[in-house]
Amino acid sequence: MIDRRSFLTAGAAVSAAGVLAACAKKNPTKSTGSKGGGTEQITLGFSQVGSESGWRAANTQSVKDAAKAAGINLKFSDAQQKQENQISAIRSYIAQKVDVISFSPVVVTGWDTVLKEAKAAGIPVILTDRSVETSDPSLYVTLVGSDFESEGERAAHLLEKVLAGQKGTVKIAQLEGTTGAAPAIERSSGFAKIMKASHPEWKIIASQSGDFTRAGGKQVMAAFLQAHSDIQVLFSHNDDMAIGAIQAIQAAGKAPGKDIKIISCDGVHDGFVAMSKGQINAIVECNPLLGPQLMDTVKTVHAGKGSTLPRWIKTKESDYTADQAAAALPSRKY
Ligand code: GZL
């Protein structure tokens, strides 16, 4: 499991500063901001996971809009949820000698080689959304994104509210995100932590990846319902899989939100609509609007001030229950 807190140390900040200094020495021509940032337009190479969910669509729009507003020249690529496509995109940005590289890693492992290539080329890397497991924290300057472990814990606390002291065994199905992705690993872990600490009566009787997509959620939930007639709760790692699961639950002749309580993550528009209909009982918000924070971070790094940044710039987010959905919908930004 990724222990991001282990990176929140001064040591890592110092080693990241070392990377930036090394970048400047290695490639004096590469504008790592050693000239104090200068006035030349910054070129950012961004590799996006894909377009698998409403969350991802909102995140992509936020990055594009924020780059435009910040006057940053954005090179953008969609990896269609394939790590090899992200690695190719990062290599292409290195070849194009962009000023900064940023990406949302589709999975946590397998990045050291290409990140070492970026470091050797003197190009600083900023992670957004999802983290990586790496033996060398200096391979990226910082992560701009949510705390998924906390989101898993918050989902369990929302379930406590929704169950309102219901006694006896609670049989839970879990729709996991993309296998090996930080949000899938950490939301599972956070939820399990609260279960272990406070709820011996909660039993996860089925758990499988729906790959963060509606189709995946529908397909896997249908299989769960075939195998288990006694599912009382669904914990879904995102709204898109929950919305797919709702279709499967209805096809099985059951009422989502009533026969099977649903706790989800993200808080996209369609998730709030389902919640306003009582089909989803509660949502842990995961804010996709990371664009402005990312562009501020790009400018700080390009100005050679990356060492002043924390190793993790966390996004702020809230939790919602169904009774709040209708009132919140009009002001939702994604
Ligand atoms: C979370 C993000 C996840 C969302 C999904 O920050 O990585 O990926 O929860 C998205 O909707 O596909």
Image (cartoon, grey):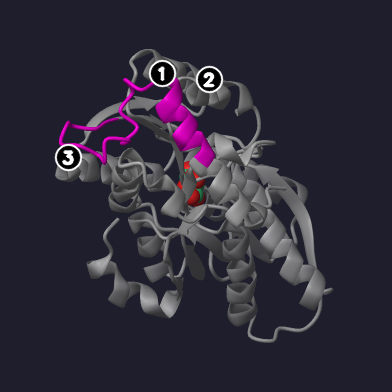
Position of residue 332 in the picture relative to residue 123 (left or right):
left
Dot 2 crowding, Cα within 10 Å, few <14, some 14–19, many 20+ = some
Residue nearest the viewer, comparing 234 with 28: 28
On screen, residue 282 above or below 87: below
Residue nearest the viewer, comparing 301 with 43: 301
Q: Do the residues labelled 1 and 3 touch (CB within 8 Å)?
A: no
Of marks 2 and 3, which one's residue comes earlier in the chain? 3
Residue 110 visible to the viewer: yes
Q: Mark 2 points at which residue?
A: 117
Q: Name the residue under label 3.
A: 68
Q: Which residue is drawn at 55% across and 59% down?
A: 147
- Marks 2 and 1, how far apart in space? 8 Å
- Marks 1 and 3, how far apart in space? 22 Å
Q: Which residue is drawn at 37% across and 63% down?
A: 272
Q: Give the range drawn in magenta.
A: 18-43
| Res 131 quadrant in image | top right
Secondary structure category for the residue under label 2: helix
Of marks 1 and 3, which one's residue comes earlier in the chain? 3
Position of the C terminus, as image quadrant, is bottom left
| Secondary structure predominantly adopted by residues drawn in magenta | loop
Query: In the rendering, which numbered label is found on residue 94?
Result: 1
Q: Disc 2 vs disc 3: which is toward the camera?
A: 2
Q: Position of residue 141 (x, y in %)?
A: 48, 42
- Marks 2 and 3, how far apart in space? 28 Å
Q: Where is residue 333 in the image (x, y as percent from the top left)?
A: 26, 60
On screen, residue 207 above or below 333: above
Q: Do the residues labelled 2 and 1 touch (CB within 8 Å)?
A: yes
Q: Residue furthest right?
A: 200
Dot 1 crowding, Cα within 10 Å, few <14, some 14–19, many 20+ = many
On screen, residue 128 above or below 90: below
Q: Which residue lies furthest to the bottom in this view?
A: 165
Q: Which amino acid does the dot numbered 3 rest on?
A: Lys
